[in-house]
Amino acid sequence: MTLTLGHYGLLVAIVGLPLGLVGLYLRALAANVRDYQRTTSQRLDGHKTHMENQEARLRAVEQGKVSHADWVRVVTSQQHSLDTTRELVREMAGKLDATLGISGSLNRVANAIERKTEAPE
């Protein structure tokens, strides 16, 4: 049996065409894999950048954190300022009482101010 041109055409149709289609499919699959790898790499880079930003923010917070001694110093200073203000209000109440005789009203206002500042928030 000798192979004729028709036999070669049939052989190409039976073997060559499916192999060609498989080759094209594999090329498309390889392109999809490369796109997926590129996208995944970009996402990982984005996450890495986000984590670096978060670490930088955390370092900034740690550096800007107030120590216990500083906190006590500020609270003491504010307490002293509040005590000074209370003394001034009492002194003004005494002077107004002496000049105008309205000590009852001022005492109520001063007591209300003291209660408001001493009440926990």
Image: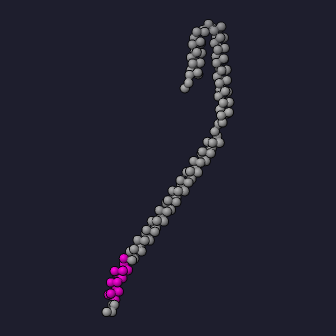
The residue under the point 67% across, 23% down is 80
The quarter of the rendered structure image containing the C terminus is top right
The colour style of the image is one colour
Rendered position, 32 above or below 93: below
- Does residue 62 appear to the left or right of 35 in the view shown? right
Q: Residue furthest bottom?
A: 1
- Does residue 45 appear to the left or right of 93 in the view shown? left
Q: Is residue 11 magenta?
A: yes
The residue under the point 43% across, 71% down is 26
Q: Position of residue 87 (x, y in %)?
A: 66, 17
Query: What count of labels does the image hold?
Result: 0
Question: Magenta stretch: dominant SS?
Answer: helix
Rendered position, 25 above or below 2: above
Rendered position, 5 above or below 32: below
Q: Position of residue 79 (x, y in %)?
A: 65, 24
Q: Residue furthest front?
A: 68
Q: Position of residue 120 (x, y in %)?
A: 56, 24
Rendered position, 85 above or below 60: above
The residue under the point 64% across, 22% down is 82
**What is the span of residues highlighted in magenta in the rendered image?**
5-18
Q: Quadrant of residue 4?
A: bottom left
The residue under the point 66% across, 30% down is 72
The quarter of the rendered structure image containing the N terminus is bottom left
Q: Is residue 118 magenta?
A: no
